[in-house]
Image: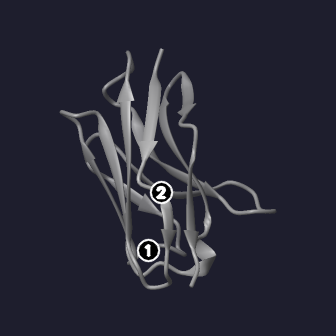
């Protein structure tokens, strides 16, 4: 069974930066895709960024150029560096790991961008 533990959320002023981390443990295919979805109040969950084991990345248009996803396969950890944060980035960010068997989700971490 796979477990995901997230860290790094918090309150930041507009224009600031945060880095989220998500560590995976348990048994899963090494080819798993990892990444982050986010859900703002009253909105549907949306993909923010994802990365394959080989390092291929995909970003939502709204975060491209501001967010950078990376992955340390030796540590089974994925990171999301978020720069130039905007109030509209405020959301609960959920780490995920996806294999052919389906997705596993983290518990979510709150990111609030406010002055």
Residue 85, percent from left and from top: 47, 78
The structure residue drawn at horizontal position 31% and vertical position 26%, both measured from the top left corner, is: 30
Tag 2 and tag 1, C-beta contact below 8 Å: no
Q: Looking at the image, which is closer to me, 4 or 115?
A: 115
For label 1, count other residues whose C-alpha is less than 10 Å away and answer few (under 14), some (14-19) or many (20+). few
Real-space Cα separation, disc 2 to disc 1, in angstroms: 19 Å
For label 2, count other residues whose C-alpha is less than 10 Å away and answer few (under 14), some (14-19) or many (20+). some
The structure residue drawn at horizontal position 50% and vertical position 25%, both measured from the top left corner, is: 100
Q: Establish if 16 lies above or below 45.
A: below
The structure residue drawn at horizontal position 54% and vertical position 21%, both measured from the top left corner, is: 101
Q: Mark 1 points at which residue?
A: 64
Q: Establish if 43 lies above or below 87.
A: above
Look at the image and name its color scheme.
one colour
Left or right position of 21 against 98: left
Name the quadrant containing residue 78: top left
Q: In which quarter of the image is the C terminus?
A: bottom right
Residue 35, percent from left and from top: 44, 47
Name the quadrant containing residue 62: bottom right
Q: Mark 2 points at which residue?
A: 9
Left or right position of 74 against 110: left
Q: Looking at the image, which is closer to me, 50 or 16?
A: 16
Residue 77, percent from left and from top: 30, 39
Q: Establish if 72 lies above or below 37.
A: above
Helix, strand or loop at mark 1: loop
The structure residue drawn at horizontal position 44% and vertical position 35%, both measured from the top left corner, is: 5
Mark 2 or mark 1, earlier in chain: 2
Give the number of the disc on residue 20: none
- Furthest residue toward right: 42
Count of numbered labels shown in the rendering: 2
Give the mark toward the camera: 2 or 1: 2
Helix, strand or loop at mark 2: loop
């Amino acid at each position: 069974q796979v477990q995901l533990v997230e860290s790094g959320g918090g309150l930041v002023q507009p224009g600031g930066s945060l880095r989220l981390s998500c560590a995976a443990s348990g048994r899963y295919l090494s080819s798993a895709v990892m990444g982050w979805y986010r859900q703002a109040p009253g909105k549907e969950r949306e993909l923010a960024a994802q990365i394959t084991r080989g390092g291929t990345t995909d970003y939502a248009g709204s975060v491209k150029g501001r967010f950078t996803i990376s992955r340390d396969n030796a540590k089974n950890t994925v990171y999301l560096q978020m720069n130039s944060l905007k109030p509209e980035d405020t959301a609960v960010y959920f780490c995920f790991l996806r294999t052919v068997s389906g997705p596993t989700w983290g518990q979510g971490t709150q990111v609030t961008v406010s002055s």
